[in-house]
Image (cartoon, rainbow, N blue to C red):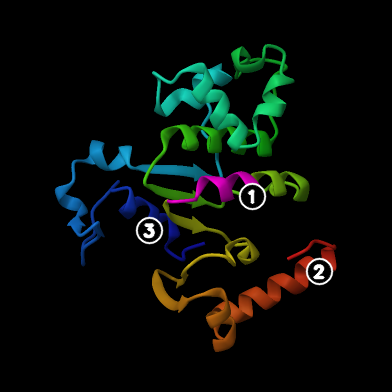
Amino acid sequence: SGAGKSTLINLISRLYDPNEGKIYIDGVDVRFIQQADLRRQVGMVLQETFLFRGTVFENIAYAKPEAEVEEVIAAAKIANAHEFITKLPDGYETVLGVRDIDLSGGEKQRLAIARAVLHNPRILILDEATAAIDVETERLVQEALERLVVGRTTFAIAHRLSTLRRADRLLVLDRGKLVEMGTHTELLRRRGVYHRLFTTQRKALSRMGVAG
């Protein structure tokens, strides 16, 4: 949408370096951290989930190929994915990317969350992780995300603002500039950009019969 969120993601994960200013992690300029080392510490759950042709097990274990079966299953349970996986034709050995195996958007998201759980990153980036899925599936995905973020520095990007209420700090970007910062309650009190967006969304969701 031109707000600058994609740029922010790319800078945090160091897909490219900033032209101005600096980014620090634990007091260290990210430019002095090897990219491979940094990316081992950064996990992502994106709106467009990357799944390759391979088994469910292989897709979850992508970030940790040496993972034991028990580790993969534990990650899937945390991600609310284990139940639907066991109902697939061959369970964890079901091959994705072949005819007749068509996962829903919510199921793909939960596999991505399971992959992130197994990766166990210190920094987590969630980019529209609950977008384009139905309300009931969103509940399952949101539960899984709440388990995933515990103890991690998490950057959550979302247009549906109700999913960000619990954040320690909210940053509002507009055309690449930071225009507001604070907690959900603080930003509502200011009655600025965030207040306007949140109120508009809540009214729209109410008309649709969706809790916001």
Residue 142, labelled with which disc? 1
Front-lying residue, 151 or 174: 151
| Position in image of residue 10 (x %, y %) | 35, 51
Q: Amino acid at mark 3?
A: Leu
Q: Earlier in the sequence, mark 3 or mark 2?
A: 3
Q: For the magenta stretch, what is the residue range?
A: 142-151
Secondary element at image label 2: helix
Q: Of the residues shown, which amino acid type is indicated by label 1?
A: Gln
Circle 1: element type? helix
Q: Which one is earlier in the sequence, the residue at label 1 or at label 2?
A: 1
Q: Alpha carbon of mark 1 to alpha carbon of mark 3: how far?
A: 23 Å
Residue placed under numbered mark 2 in the picture: 206
Distance, label 3 to label 2, CA atoms, is 31 Å
Q: Is residue 191 visible?
A: no
Q: Which residue is mark 3?
A: 8
Badge nearest the viewer, 1 or 2? 1
- Residue located 24% across and 60% down the image: 23
For badge 2, the amino acid type reads Ser
